[in-house]
Amino acid sequence: MKLLPVNPLEENYLCLNKDEFAKLLRRTLETDGGGAFFKVLEKVEGVPYYATILIDNQKILAVEVQNVKSGEILVGDSALQMIKKMIEGGPTIVDAFPLSDVDVKMSVIDNIDVYNSTPKIPLSELCPSLGGEPSSLKSAVESDKPVSKSLPLEEKESKPKPKPKPRTEFSLEVPSQLEPYFRAFGNRLVKYAKSIGIEPSRVKMVAKEVRYALGAGTGVHATIEVEGSSDSLMSPAKLQENLESFAYREAAELSEELAKKVVISSLTLKL
């Protein structure tokens, strides 16, 4: 679905379960009060899916889900069932965009076909912990806010300055016309890796253009290698799975930008 040029509240936000997604949904709705647009990436039975969701402060307005590997698009009831599985399965990677009332109406116009095919179900069916009343959202958000405590001046001054972290070595082997796109992709990948507790020392991306048979056009196949260390409580396998999910979503968005299919052939994480 199309998204208006609005600023995100969160990008590449990791929700470990449906309750964390519900909290993010609350915060997003409270920002502008009209509604929200979400981009969600998650694996269901080992298959990566990329979903876009448009909501107002009471119900789901439009949902579209794409199978990242096959390119199949789900809408209507099948899309709703899939997004429920994605959120319930966790963890999910989410971009959250607050929308005003006007933004919501404009988004409906921009995505009218998906809107017309989507059953309008209450948000509580997607996230039961939200409850049924939108008026409860504000108090729920406020109760989730952390309480900040000011340290005495002496204690602040006594804290040692953190050591600068080493820079990430970035290697890129792609056709020249694709380099700006994959360099930006790599920068986002490094940023996301750090957000989940990976400190990458080296990232290598190799991409090649391929021509499909029977006049099916061209595409781009890419491999990614990430080396580094981690202080995350997640297992290396789970960290790799999260990195893969992020890369699949980036590939789906890059496919739209380049107007050709971008496939992540493999992603290797070495810690």
Image (cartoon, rainbow, N blue to C red):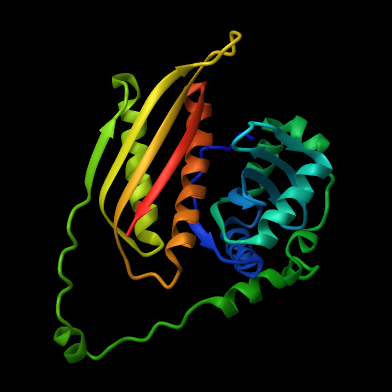
Q: Which residue occupies the foreground of this view, 186 or 134?
A: 186
Name the quadrant containing residue 155.
Answer: bottom left
Q: Is residue 148 above or below residue 10?
A: below
Q: How many marks are shown on the rendered structure?
A: 0
Q: Is residue 150 above or below residue 219?
A: below
Q: Is residue 54 visible?
A: yes
Q: Which residue occupies the foreground of this view, 257 or 134?
A: 257
- Residue drawn 49% across the image and 29% down it: 262
Q: Position of residue 258 (x, y in %)?
A: 47, 23
Q: Position of residue 228 (x, y in %)?
A: 28, 57
Q: Which residue occupies the foreground of this view, 5 or 223?
A: 223
* Quarter of the rendering occupied by the C terminus: bottom left
Q: Is residue 10 visible?
A: no
Name the quadrant containing residue 23.
Answer: bottom right
* Quarter of the rendering occupied by the N terminus: top right
- Residue drawn 47% across the image and 32% down it: 254
Give the side of residue 203 with respect to residue 52, left or right.
left
- Residue drawn 55% across the image and 53% down it: 94
Give the side of residue 51 with respect to residue 236, left or right.
right
Q: Which residue occupies the foreground of this view, 167 or 148?
A: 167
Q: Is residue 200 above or below residue 136?
A: above
Q: Position of residue 198 (x, y in %)?
A: 34, 61
Q: Position of residue 146 (x, y in %)?
A: 48, 79
- Residue drawn 24% across the image and 38% down it: 171
The residue lying furthest to the top in this view is: 215
